[in-house]
Amino acid sequence: MVNKKSRNWLVGGVVALVVLMAVGYAALAQELEIFGTANIDVEWNVEFTDITLVDSHQIDEVHTPSHTATTATFEVDLLAPSAFAEYDVEVSNNGTIDAKVSSININESTDIADVEYTVSGIAVDDELAVGNTHAVTVRVDWDEEAEELPAEMPVSETITVTILYVQDTD
């Protein structure tokens, strides 16, 4: 038989365990509320920053190129086959988020098959880190071996280059 003293300790231990479990359950069953704020300070600012005519041959008039943040427009009057105009374009990341090229689109206004437009120095998925600049070359060429000449000269060509960037998540 269990003596009376041992039984009292056993009963006291069971009561203490039940009380401890009740307190633990009450503490864990409380609704936890967390208050706070977070500020994210980022700026997206990838844009064309400069356009310079660097070389040309047989062009009539130099029109001032124009640009918005993502689009550059060039107009050139070509006098004869072998005429060309070449521009250096700077695209800068002045924001706080790294970027990469998602697309490059060229829209031209030519009806002449022998006029070609090229954009070089940049490709889709090229990265542009914060504070860096892409140097891009845009060129319009009239093939020197062109056989058909348009009725009106000079040939006025307009090219619009759009370079779209997205956040670089790599």
Image (cartoon, rainbow, N blue to C red):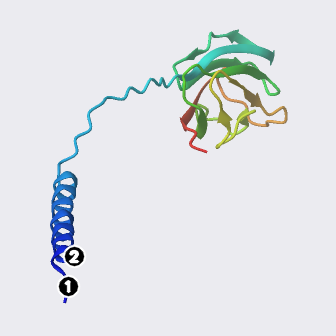
Q: Nearer the viewer, residue 108 or 13?
A: 13
Q: Determine the image quadrant of residue 75.
A: top right
| Mark 2 residue element | helix
The kind of residue on which mark 2 rests is Ser
The kind of residue on which mark 1 rests is Val
Q: Residue at x 55, y 29 (%)?
A: 97
Say whether residue 49 is left or right of residue 146: left
Disc assigned to residue 51:
none
Q: Which residue is mark 2?
A: 6
Say whether residue 116 is left or right of residue 110: right
Quadrant location, the C terminus: top right
Q: Residue at x 56, y 43 (%)?
A: 169
Say whether residue 55 is left or right of residue 66: right
Q: Residue at x 63, y 10 (%)?
A: 63
Check disc 2: other Cα within 10 Å, few if <14, some if 14-19, many if 20+: few
Q: Residue at x 61, y 38 (%)?
A: 101
Image location of residue 67, percent across then percent down: 55, 18
Disc assigned to residue 2:
1
Residue 86 visible in rendering: yes
Q: Determine the image quadrant of residue 156.
A: top right
Q: In the rendered structure, are the residues bearing label 1 and label 2 in contact, judged by CB atoms less than 8 Å apart? A: yes
Image height of 103 relative to 27, above or below: above
Image location of residue 118, percent across then percent down: 72, 34
Image height of 79 relative to 119, above or below: above
